[in-house]
Amino acid sequence: MFKFWRSSNVRSRLTLSYLAVVALMLSGFGLATFVVAYSQLRNQVGQFAMWELKTFQGLLFFAPDGTLRLPHEKLCESDDASGAYVTVLSPDGALLFQSRNLRGRGLGGPPAGGEGINGFSERSIRLPSGEHVRLLSKSHLLDGRRMLIRVARSEEPIRVQARRLLLMMLVTLPAVLVVAGAAGHVLARRALSPIQHMIFRAREITAERLGQRFANDEANDELGRLARALNDILTRIESAFEQLRRFTSDCPHELRTHLATIRSVGEVGLQKILTPDEYRNTIGSMLEEVDRLTSLVDSLLMITRADAGKLPLQRVAVSVMALAREAASLLEVLIEEKSLRLVFDGEERVEVEADRSILKQALVNIINNAVNYSPAGETVAVRVLIRDASEVMVEVEDHGPGISPDDQVKVFERFYRGGRAREGSPRGAGLGLAIAKWAVEANGASIGLVSVIGQGCTFRITLPRCIAKNDSVGHTQRASFIDG
Amino acid sequence: MDSRESSDLRVLVVEDEEKLARSLQEGLQADEYSVVVSNTAEDGFYLAESQHFDLLILDVMLPRRSGIEILATLRQQGIKTPVMILTARDSIEDRVLGLNTGADDYLVKPFAFPELLARLRALLRRGQEVVRQHLAFEDLEMNTAERSVTRSGNYLDLTSREYDLLKCLLINKGRVVSRGMLARDVWKEPSRYTPIDNVIDAQIVRLRRKLDDPFEIKLLQTVRGVGFILRRGAKCSSSGGRAMYARG
């Protein structure tokens, strides 16, 4: 029971608050009813006493002996409580008359100041006998003498009724609360039952079964919206998981390939006696493989660190074109060896906000990719274009074999190495573009590509433009146009 | 080998991986260092504290006590021996921690041995670095003031990159220079995940065309799997190293 009060169960809490409200409302209503009913009844008693007082007013007379009398004294001589109590006092408080049923004990004490002067005074008092009465007072002038008439009627009958009413309320309130509580509980359960379903469904969703979805996403209520939001999250998690799964299953594979090479080169080298030069060659070949393994592990480390958000970025204003030229100059010798023509075009001075070295990494990898897949003698174009006030686009276009629509989605995935038909990249581990994509996205930018099979491929990086320098850049740009 | 400067230099290697420790010892001894190896942090600390060494090579991840801790204690005691840190962790925090503790340089495992040698030499030379105006090897001569290169008196027309590359090789003449060293010193690209190796190989091919192709004796040799070296080669061919990139 104790637990129930502190329950963290929404249904119980809902029921409890509902019950509290009902109890409060019923008590308030009961109290109001009681107060109104009781004062109504008491008014009736007072009304009755007033009629009697008016009657006595007319009937009172002074007897020849100077005492005050009522002609039909019997009226108020009965002992039972249904009779009225009457006293008449002089203004100084002397008792002029009292009905016998008071047994000489008086009624209401000495007159209060102003009592009964202006119309009727009315109050409830308790008689020495313990009886509660409604007392009415009225000032009266008889034969030139001022006096105060007091008439009282018992309140006991209405107090009995009031007690009965109260008792009835106290008995029915808990009963009503029990019924209301039960009803509330049932209602809460019914309202919350979709959540119960969702809980069951959520328990079924595990890393292995991310394909499951919440079924009530059609509904247009809050729970339907919740289900849709959760389904959205699930879809995103599922695709992230899928990528991770492919990555983790590919990763040991890649490592194993290199290890296998090292091992077999070493074993074959040991099979027969070789000349020192041949041994050198064997060891050198193994070391080459170690190099590839090392750079693979380095790349993986960088990617995992990036995934974990542990690579700190230092964002500064960077001139995109300058950075692109820098990236390309690193690859200059490869470009020359293939007799490629590298052309730069577009906005020279526009700046973006980015981490210089990470963005350069992305540009190097993308230009390197373009260089790798370009046939000898072709052109690679790097363009910097202003998209709008807030975005700059960098395009790297090659005239290589192009990438099929199926592969376009996959080229940015880790370990993906285009169709095997596309020879060219001599040392790639299939991580270059994955790193480029990460590097671009880390800088708050996005990367995409368009390609027509046989005609080449254009990678597009959309970068947030550096706001602070926008204006001056715009002006110089325009100015130079006018000069030209 | 030009090893006069390193003769009789004492190096302490604190490395718990015995195989690596042994190969470091052999490699350094071949370069005429006298080497003491310690496999535990406690031993290493005791040795570093009680004897004189010209260089310390500290592994970071030692059992029980990290190399960084040893380094911190040594520096607290006022021992100023140059320290080279070896680490398998290369996050920026790790590097900063190492250098802040008083390490003079660090190398990330797996490192190229020629690079370790070059860095150790740099540590020993620290403060007394002189850029020589005249570098020479065999009939090859370089004037660093004029940035001009001749071989057998013939002027070689080198691009700026080719000149820097040759200069780096000339400074380390007779020693192997790894691709990592070239990437850092010539291309100023420290990161290991750029496609820089392809660039270096292509640049070497071009340099060789100007430097060696017109001459009978080849000077620029490829040490397969390790790097490049300026060394007097056989008379006929120097292209043995080129076959290594045939793999796709």
Image (tube, grey):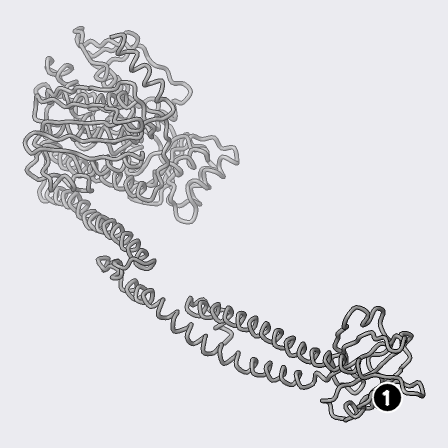
In the image, residue B33 above or below residue A207: above
**Is residue B173 at least partly visible in the picture?**
no
Q: Which residue is mark 1?
A: A104
Q: Position of residue B141 (x, y in %)?
A: 23, 10
Give the residue drawn at x 79%, y 81%: A58
Dividing the picture into quadrants, the one containing residue A119 is bottom right
Q: Identify the amino acid type marked 1.
A: Gly
Residue A22 or A59: which is nearer the viewer?
A59
**Is residue A136 at least partly visible in the picture?**
yes
Dividing the picture into quadrants, the one containing residue A46 is bottom right
Classify mark 1: helix, strand or loop. Answer: loop
Q: Position of residue B241 (x, y in %)?
A: 13, 27
Which chain is disc 1 placed on? A
Give the residue drawn at x 39%, y 38%: B94
Q: Position of residue A417 (x, y in %)?
A: 13, 39
In the image, residue A206 above or below residue A440: below
Residue A352 or B242: which is nearer the viewer?
A352
Give the residue drawn at x 28%, y 34%: A445
